[in-house]
Image (spheres, rainbow, N blue to C red):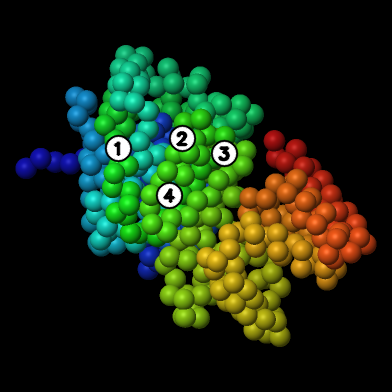
Amino acid sequence: MTHTPHLHTTLDGPATAPPLILGPSIGTSLAVWEPQLPALARTHRTLRWDLPGHGGSPATALPHDGSATIADLAALVLNLADTHNWDRFAYAGISIGGAVGLYLAAHHPDRISSLAIVCSSAHFAEPSVWRDRAKLVREQGTEAMVASRPGLWFSHAFADTDRGRALLQDLRDTDRAGYAACCDVLADYDVRDVLPSITAPTLVVAGRDDPATPPPHAREIADAIPGASLVEVAHAAHLAGAERPETVTSALATHFAETTTAPHDDTTRHAAGMAVRRAVLGDAHVDRAVARTTPFTARFQDFITRYAWGEIWTGDGLDRRMRSAITLTALIAHGHDAELAMHIRSALTNGLTRDEIGEVLLQSAIYCGVPAANSAFATAQRVFDEIDTEDSKGS
C-alpha cells in the first residue's frame, strides 16, 4: 500500500459552519489568504492548504519525474476533504489553486457546492514555458524567480511593504523540487473544453493589471461557465487579494454568503447580511454599531442587517458597483452627509474609483441639485484626504 503524504493545512472558523477550502498560488504559502481569512472564517469552516514543497507541505506529495498533473493536486484536496468528512464543500483558489478548483468542479461536481476562481486560467502558458521554468528552478532554486515577481505578482511599491516582503520570502523558502513539480502540473493543464459542464455557482476574479493571467483569461472562464459572475479589480496584478484585499474580500464574502444561505430563513439571512455588511462597511464600523446597540435599538439593528444587507445587498440583480452608485445618489438627494461619507468608503471597497465617484456626484448635481452636490463633493474630498493620511501612516 502506497503512503500518500499529507498536505500542511490550517483550520479556522466555527466547527459547525459550512466548509470552505482555499487553494494558494505557486510560490506562495497558505499565508497568501491572510487578508481574506477573518471575513471568510466568520461564516465558514475554512481550510487553507500548502502546495507540495510550499509552506509546510512535503515536496514528495507530487512526483518529481515530470509526470505530475492537475488530477494529482485535485486528489490531494479531495483527500483533505475526506479527512474532515466533507462530502461537499465550497472552494476558492488563486492561480494554480484556482486551476484545481476548475478541475474539481468539472470532474467531481458532486463535491463542489460553490466555486471562486481568483487570478487564474483555464490554460496557462505553452507547455515549453513551464518545462523551461521547472528546469531552471531544479538547477538554481526558487531564488531564480524572486527578482521577476515584483511587477508580476504585485506592484514594485507593494513589494516593499511587510506583506510583499513576506510573500517573496515564502517563494525563497519553497522547495525547488516541489515548485518544479507544480510547473509540471501547469505544463499539461488545460480545462477549456470542460468549462461548460461546470454547474457550481461560480465567481471569477481578475486583476486588471495582471500580466500572468490577464482579464481575457478570466472572461474566457466566466463566459464558458453557465451563470458565472466576473469581478475585475482595478490596480491589481496577479496576487490581487494581497494588493487590493478589500475588493477581493468583499466579492468572495458576498459570493459565498449568497451560495450557502437559505433565502427565506431569517437566521441564515441575518448571518449572510452581517457578512456582507462587514465586507462593504468594514469590521471597525460594524463593531462600533454593534457595540452601541441597546434594547431600544436592537430590533432596528436586526432589521437593517437582515433586510437591507441580508436581502437587498446580497441580491444578484445588480453588482456591488451599481448598488454603491445608487446608494450615493440617494444619500446626496436627501442630504445624509454622515451616511454619505461612510458609503463613499464602501464604494471604493466595492470597486468604484475616485474618478467614478466624482462622476456620480457630478451626475447628482443635475438631478439632486447643485447645493446637494457641492456638499457631497466636500464630503468626498474629506474622506479621500482621511484615507490618504491613513495610508501614509501605514506605509
Residue 80, compared with residue 57, is above or below; it is below
- Residue 208: numbered disc: 3
Numbered disc 3: secondary structure: loop
Residue that carries the numbered disc 1 in the rendered image: 190
Mark 4 and mark 2 in contact? Answer it, CB < 8 Å: no
Circle 3 or circle 4, nearest the eye: 4
Q: CA distance from mark 1 to mark 3?
A: 22 Å
What residue is at 69 percent from the left and 55 percent from the top? 347
Numbered disc 1: secondary structure: loop
What residue is at 50 percent from the left and 51 percent from the top? 230
- Left or right of 51? Residue 333 is right
Q: CA distance from mark 2 to mark 1?
A: 14 Å
Quarter of image, res 3: top left
Residue that carries the numbered disc 4 in the rendered image: 223
Residue 112, compared with residue 245, is above or below; it is below
Numbered disc 4: secondary structure: helix
Regarding residue 254, the answer to whether it shows in the image is yes
- Left or right of 163? Residue 134 is left
Residue that carries the numbered disc 2 in the rendered image: 213
Tell me which label, 4 or 2, sits earlier in the chain: 2
Mark 2 and mark 1 in contact? Answer it, CB < 8 Å: no
